[in-house]
Image (spheres, rainbow, N blue to C red):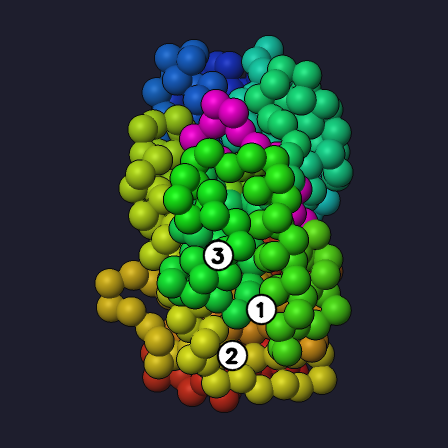
Amino acid sequence: MATERRATDSHAAASVLESADFVRIVTRADGDGLAAAGLLARELSRRETPFQVTVGTTVADRTARVQGGTATDDQSVTVAIGALESTGDAGSGPASDARAGARTISLERTDRPATLETAELLGDLGSEPDLQLTLAGTTAAGIEPGAGGTEWLLERALEEDVLERRPGVAVPTTDPIDGLAHSTACLAPWSGDLDATEAALESVPTALEHPAELSVDDHRAIGSLVALDAVGHDGAVDAAGTAIGRFLRPYALPDGPFATLGGFAEVLEATAQVEPGTGIALAMGHTTREPALETWRACGQQVHDAIDSATTSRYGGLFALDCADHASTERGLPLRSIARVVAAYRSPEQAVLAVGPDSAALAVRESQPLEGRIDAIATHLGAGAQYDLGRQWCSLRFDAQTDTERVIDTVRDQL
């Protein structure tokens, strides 16, 4: 099942959207995809254009939703955010579908986040994207603010005072104990344990007594403590230094839904995996801060509990975690976050595979083309196996009877 990730001519796409009677947005389930969908949904609301947003958790699911939208007999437009199954017309761009005048726009590119592509599209529509949401989406995609084509966004956000750089850590809450204990962007000895996190911050009294009143010196002290604990852990690898560097000196959001830009990105990513409906509502600007934070906390707790209890194995180029025994019946296991934080802080190999009872996620430290590899992996796992992919990650779904060792061996053989 080959995939296509087509570059879209934003001028042509803008023209198509301006004449739409109804817009269907079908997005992949990650922080970048949710932010991109939210940006477009906000613009459509402003224009009073009716729309619908749905999340497709695999390439096949998303493709089916897109094809269902293009089969309608009206002037609707379907916007796809995420890779689709190849139809053999990858060079056609956002041109009209031949069936019944329906049209499809792809906002997926291999060289930059969908959020950034959507921001450019909004510019062609004569609108300004929400700077905090746009930068949160690109941050969720692994792009540092000010890098990878986001320079103009960061410059404008700083000029308009919607961001401000400060010492400390990139968590979504003003309470650093809550933020650090549940963060999936940091991995330290106290991660996942509120009491242990509180004990680690005992040298910063304000953090314990008045967490919303931290001074610049308090933030700096917390950042130093976190850095030492994260890179000083016995299991930390050299890459942990780079990862913790991205976690420190965050961009604070004076009037944002969360305390920092990195925290906003983390909440988007958590909700995308566990409760995408909440994440979409958040990205659209609805009042869902508290439900989103609760989802983020639950996600973080699952991530750290799973890491602590997983059985690990190491191969040439791959570090694997068997998390099948930690699966919850209430929430899906956030395997992507597990794989990503282990790759960032603890993995001696470039690629990390986290395996659950009927799904798995692969994360890599450096961007590399994964389409062909994940396609081959799904094929080798047999009928019914499906996948999705984004920047530096891919995910798999397979039959619950599939043996974990078989999944690991199949992935290892294709890397």
Q: Decide: marks 1, 2 in contact (CB < 8 A)?
A: yes
Closest to the camera, between mark 2 and mark 3, is 3
Q: Is residue 25 visible?
A: no
Residue bearing the label numbered 1: 342
Task: Reply above or below: 245 against 370.
Answer: above
Report, in whole angstroms, how far the alpha carbon at label 2 lies from the one at label 3. Answer: 33 Å
Look at the image and give the residue range highlighted in magenta: 246-259
Task: Reply above or below: 89 against 20.
Answer: below
Q: Quadrant of residue 145?
A: top right
Task: Reply above or below: 262 against 373.
Answer: above
Point out residue 140 in the picture as x, y percentages from the top left corner.
Answer: 57, 45
Report, in whole angstroms, how far the alpha carbon at label 1 lies from the one at label 2. Answer: 9 Å
Identify the residue at horizontal 67%, vertical 66% (top origin): 231
Q: Is residue 247 magenta?
A: yes
Closest to the camera, between mark 1 and mark 3, is 3
- Residue 400 located left or right of residue 227: left
Q: Quadrant of the C terminus?
A: bottom right
Foreground: 4 or 388? 388
Residue bearing the label numbered 3: 202
Q: Check disc 3 and give the amino acid type.
A: Glu
Point out residue 59 in the picture as x, y percentages from the top left corner.
Answer: 49, 55
Q: Decide: marks 2, 3 in contact (CB < 8 A)?
A: no
Crowd band around label 1 with a 10 angstrom C-alpha radius: few (<14), some (14–19), many (20+): many
Element on which disc 2 rests: strand
- Residue 158 located left or right of residue 394: right
Q: Quadrant of residue 168?
A: top right
